[in-house]
Amino acid sequence: MHGRKLTITQVVWVAVSLVAVTLFVAGLPLLYNLNQELRIYPPGDRDAVHAYLMQLGLSVDLFAAYLVALGIIHAVAYFTVAAVVFWRKSDEPMALFVGLLLVLYGATFWGTTYVVGAIHPLLEWLSSFLESLGWGMLFLLFFIFPNGRFVPRWTRWPAGVLVTGAVLLALFPNPPFNMESWPFWRFFYNGLGWLLIGGYAQIYRYLRVSSPAQRQQSKWAFFGFTVALAGYLGWIWIDTLLPLDRPESRVLADLVGNAVVLGFMLIIPLSFGVAIFRYRLWDIDIIINRTLVYGTLTGMLVAIYFGGVTLLQGMLRGLTGQESTVAIVASTLTIAVLFNPLRRRIQSFIDRRFYRRKYDAAKALETFSAKLRDETDLDAVKGDLVGVIKETLQPKHVSLWVHPDPILKHEKKRAAIRESGHAE
């Protein structure tokens, strides 16, 4: 962009960002007071929560400051990446779109703007507007990333419905009719429909349209988003399974869970920052591979550990009538023994299923290296080299040129001169 269009876009970007950041900063003291008064817990549990915090050596002030500090770290990370994007790429529409999305997500995710909305109806409307705008832009991102175009072309129609719905919901956060009661609209109101259409658009774009550079950008951006979403939903799932009926358990879950959620959420701005600026900084394929391997390995080991502990505890309790640490020790030793064999098997399975071409190429190069150590015939080496290049790189044509040995060439010249009877 350039000229008046660029200027208007930049002014709007700065104005919306300033409003979002201002509401976030204004809500920090309110959020601190909310946590300090333990209003995030039911009234009947607050005395027990306070006593348990004292038992842990934590004051209520420190507990409230801890929760607010996590929100500040989250927001600062998003705001920083957005500011760098605006500073370096303020003339590119897609970069401005991602930057504004990061600002809105950083300001509204931790609930700070929501707390501000409780002060005045106008602030409530403004907070709802920013939140709806952020969610609408997040779903729209799937339709247009990384070049800002709708691919395939028909996706502009559902995107238009998405934008219209987001704008109406932002302007009228409390409509007179309940759209969630409509079965078809609920499917899209909750975001699942937009994610499915946007996910299809991204896959189609990646396979049919994107250049190699755009594919790397897409891998970086949506790898970070997928890992963050999976981690966030995984913690919610664990949170629902934990026995949190006691206030003490709820406090520990809040102390640990908020930090876990923060760690996963920080992946999003970092991955988008790398995708926009330095998508060749690291090999994303290796990172995805390692994530699949160690994520699967961790899940299997956790299941084996807790399953083993539960099973052995039940057996020992039936035999001895009391709890024993033998189950924990045995499960820990089992995990230590199974770690490397499971890792190798999972790595081999993922290489075969998800990286088949690279896996076959690696096997072909390994076989060629083994043959090369024992091969002495140059012509045979040439044939093997051409064959392995055809198998791994699959080019249309292969030609091999061997540089002549200058010493051997000189000897042949001297022999030809001697045979012709001429003096050197």
Image (cartoon, grey):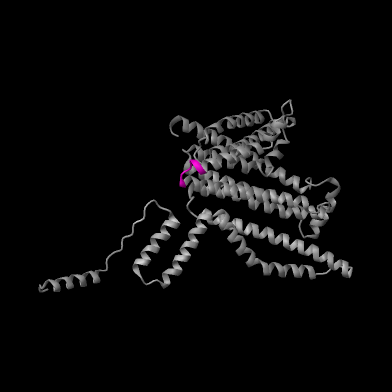
Q: Is residue 314 above or below residue 173?
A: below
Residue nearer the viewer, 273 or 67: 273
Asked whether, in this view, residue 366 is left or right of residue 78, the answer is left
Assign the N terminus to one quadrant of the image. top left
Residue nearer the viewer, 54 or 275: 275
Q: Residue furthest top?
A: 176
Magenta region, residue range: 207-212
Q: Residue furthest left?
A: 422
Residue displayed at 60% across by 47% down: 225
Q: Is residue 292 magenta?
A: no
Residue displayed at 51% across by 33% down: 9
The picture quadrant where one finds residue 388 is bottom left
- Could you tell me how many numbered marks the image carries? 0
Residue displayed at 58% across by 54% down: 353
Asked whether, in this view, residue 1 is left or right of residue 410, the answer is right
Q: Residue 283 location, x and y as percent? A: 50, 55
Q: Is residue 374 above or below residue 104?
A: below
Asked whether, in this view, residue 255 is left or right of residue 82, the answer is right
Q: Residue 376 location, x and y as percent? A: 37, 72
Residue nearer the viewer, 216 or 55: 216
- Answer whether residue 73 is visible to the viewer in this image: no
- Answer whether residue 30 is visible to the viewer in this image: yes
Residue nearer the viewer, 196 or 220: 196
Residue displayed at 74% across by 26% down: 177
Assign the C terminus to one quadrant of the image. bottom left
The picture quadrant where one finds residue 101 is top right
Q: Residue 179 location, x and y as percent? A: 72, 29
Q: Residue 409 location, x and y as percent? A: 23, 69
